[in-house]
Image (tube, grey):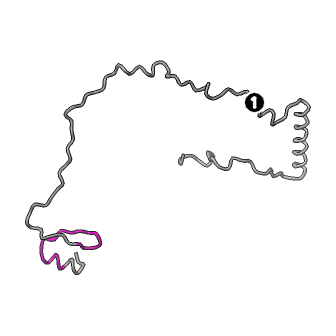
Amino acid sequence: MHLEGPWLSTTGKRKGKKKFASAEHARKAREQEESWKDLQKRWGVETEDKKRTRAMRAPSLSSEYNLTIPAGRNTTAHIPSKNTTGGYAILKPIPVYTGDKMIGIGQLHKSNAVPVFRSEDIEDIARMRR
């Protein structure tokens, strides 16, 4: 939807007030509107009645949507499921430092933990130097 252009907008679909080029155009439009309504009355067609009868003649939606499964859609029962045994994935062990060279862990800045190997590194971290 975000890739479509502004012509596919779901907002602003109501038509606003008609703006005519001149008073003559407005007068002609009003006359045509009145003649159209007179013609509808002469033939016995009311706009609201027409909408109402059209809606009442429409079939119900429940008859359109058949809830049965079409032929050919439910014929996959003969396909067996694949048996996949023996393929288990285990969790990777967490890496742990096991040497004796590292003295400890220092905090250089905020939550930046750095390993400390020498006592000079401790002094540099205290002075906030890298």
> Is 100 displayed left or right of 38 in the figure?
left
**Residue 113: where, in percent of width, then height?**
23, 68
**Residue 82: where, in percent of width, then height?**
28, 27
**Residue 123: where, in percent of width, then height?**
17, 80
- Image vertical order of residue 123 relative to residue 100, above or below: below
In the rendered image, which quarter is residue 52 located in? Answer: top right
Residue 62 part of the magenta-drawn span:
no
Q: Residue at x 85, y 32 (%)?
A: 45
In the rendered image, which quarter is residue 98 located in? Answer: bottom left
Residue 120 part of the magenta-drawn span:
yes
> Which span of residues is magenta-colored?
107-123
- Image vertical order of residue 46 relative to residue 28, above or below: above
Q: Residue at x 90, y 34 (%)?
A: 41
- Residue that label 1 marks: 54
Q: Residue furthest bottom?
A: 127
Q: Residue at x 90, y 48 (%)?
A: 27
> Is 55 displayed left or right of 75 in the figure?
right
Three-letter amino acid code of the residue under disc 1: Arg
Q: Secondary structure at mark 1?
A: helix
> Is 115 displayed left or right of 36 in the figure?
left
User: Count the marks: how many?
Assistant: 1
**Residue 127: where, in percent of width, then height?**
22, 81
Q: Residue at x 23, y 78 (%)?
A: 129
Front residue (pair 44, 15): 44
In the rendered image, which quarter is residue 86 located in? Answer: top left
